Image: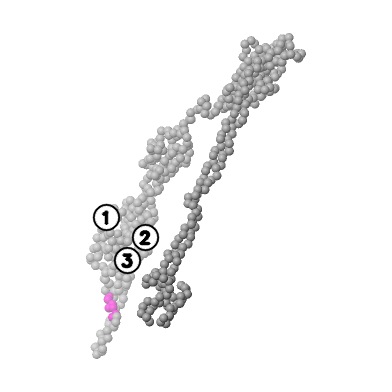
Amino acid sequence: MRFTRFAAALGAVALVGAVVIAVAGPASAGGSHPSPSPSPTCSPSPGAAAWDETIVDHVAYTDPDTVVPDTWVVDTAASEETLVDHEAHWQRYSWVGGPIAEGVTPSWSGPADPSWQANTAGDPNKIGHAGAYDQGKPGHADWFYLEWVPAATHVVHHAEAGHWEHHPAIPGQHHDAVTHVVHHPATPPVTCPSPYEDTITVTPAVIVTPPTCDAEGSFTLSPESGVLWSAVDGNEPGSIVFTAAPAPGYAFPADVQTQFSVPNLDQLAADDEECYAPPQVAYVVPATPSVQDECGTDDDTYLLPPNGDGIAYSYDEDGQVLATITAENTEWNDLPGDWKLNEAGDAVHLGNDDDFTDEPCVFPVPTQLNADPTPPTCTAPGALDTDALTAGAQAQGLDEDGDLVYEFEHLTLLVDRTVPGLVGLFVYADDGTSLEGLSEAWTVSDDGVFAYRVITLGHTIGFQSSDSEAPCFQQQTATPTPTPTEVTEVLPDDPAPTTSATPVTSEVLASGPTLAATGSNGTLAMAGIALLVLLLGTGGVALAQRR
């Protein structure tokens, strides 16, 4: 019986069997009665509705499981096996104990006798019995001994082999609860004659406030006085049935309702039909990624917006910004023009053509590229130090045109020295970059991605004797004419070189780190001019071919 939640409403409560009797409070003002004389023969009662009581004879239970012991199953019984180490056979021994006098048979003390040596397993001479015997001519016979060797065996014990067989426990038998129902018939109300001269008429009522999705329901018993209430559990779980009877000195109108059923007043469940509310769908649009526009195009990208509003941002396999809905009950609103949906329902950012520029990255060139060659001297031509020129670069060898190739960071240098006396330098900026910091000695393309420079290496000045103002003037000393004499001619191992007063014109093309100038002649001068014209006229073509 569930009366706990109704105790406050019942007032003073007395429990009699399955019936709760609430004693009415005092009558309202103007309706009070003087204390009556107690009636010795009549006890009023509100009565009670019929109800069934379930009596539990015994609760449900399950017998313990029966444990079945594991059993040992013999796969192979224990056994004894006799193994033959060797079969019975004849063993022949040879005499090694020295000469034996004729007519004397050598003695035998056993296989360990040092005068006998095992010869062969068997009876090759077909003797057929144990003992010493000789073979051969008298005086030249060999002695042998034939021993019968019994068979040798040993016994091997094989232990029993088997396995344990597991038996699961036998589940205990389940026994359902045993109950029986006791029916309690309705108890009619007992109304005693009023000891009062007059009675007060009241109308019983139960005012019910139904439960909601946010709170449990409630009920109120009315009026507050003049009614005796009894209650029993209703047929539905959580329900209760109230029965009203007039208290002494009170009366009900004719045909008034005296029995009231109050339903279960628990708060409605969230999944109750009355409480269900369809989820509210939130419509979202992806945030616009910010643009990272760097020089060139290699580092241009869109930056991911921060996650929020039920959207997570990432990059897809193509590097595009991907927006994925992560919140429930969230859908895409109309997407901006630079977004589209993929097959998975994610939004892919397409970007705009004007989001990025293609301004090349400008990197200062290595300063040694602006270095001038070493000027010529009286004894040496001008030279260009390629070790210093290419410091910090990675040598890549020769290209198909025979030019030396060097890779710097952000640029490539080609050194062309195929024309004697001239060195052609070609610089190519990497894709997306341009050149900066070249001196006026360089010719740079309009877009700043290619430049070239032609260096003329001065020839050896040479010593002069006719012009005292010359940089390499050297006065020539007259050599006296020797007087002929008869001498023995001795040729030196290293004749001294003849000194010449004319300029050096030998053509030597440097092949080491230092590029030296060669002597001048018409052919070389024209080749140098041709190279210069080629460089000045076809710089753009060279760029296209070499890049």
Is label 1 or label 2 in front?
2
From this viewpoint, which residue is outermost toward the top?
197
| Rendering coords of residue 401 (x, y %) | 27, 59
User: Relative to 198, does residue 73 appear above or below in the rendering?
Assistant: below
Q: Are marks 1 and 2 in contact (CB under 8 Å)?
A: no
SS at mark 3 in the image = strand
Mark 2 lies on a secondary structure that is strand
- In the picture of the structure, the residue carrying the numbered disc 3 is 515
Residue located 46% across and 40% down the image: 312
Instruction: Give residue 278's position: percent from left, percent from top.
Output: 48, 28
Tag 2 residue: 394
Amino acid at circle 1: Thr
Residue matched to label 1: 538
Distance, label 3 to label 1, CA atoms, is 25 Å
Find the magenta span and give its range: 495-501
Distance between the alpha carbons at the discs numbered 2 and 3: 19 Å
Badge 2 local density, few (<14 within 10 Å), some, or many (20+)?
few
Q: How packed is label 1: few (under 14 Cα within 10 Å), some, or many (20 or more)?
A: few
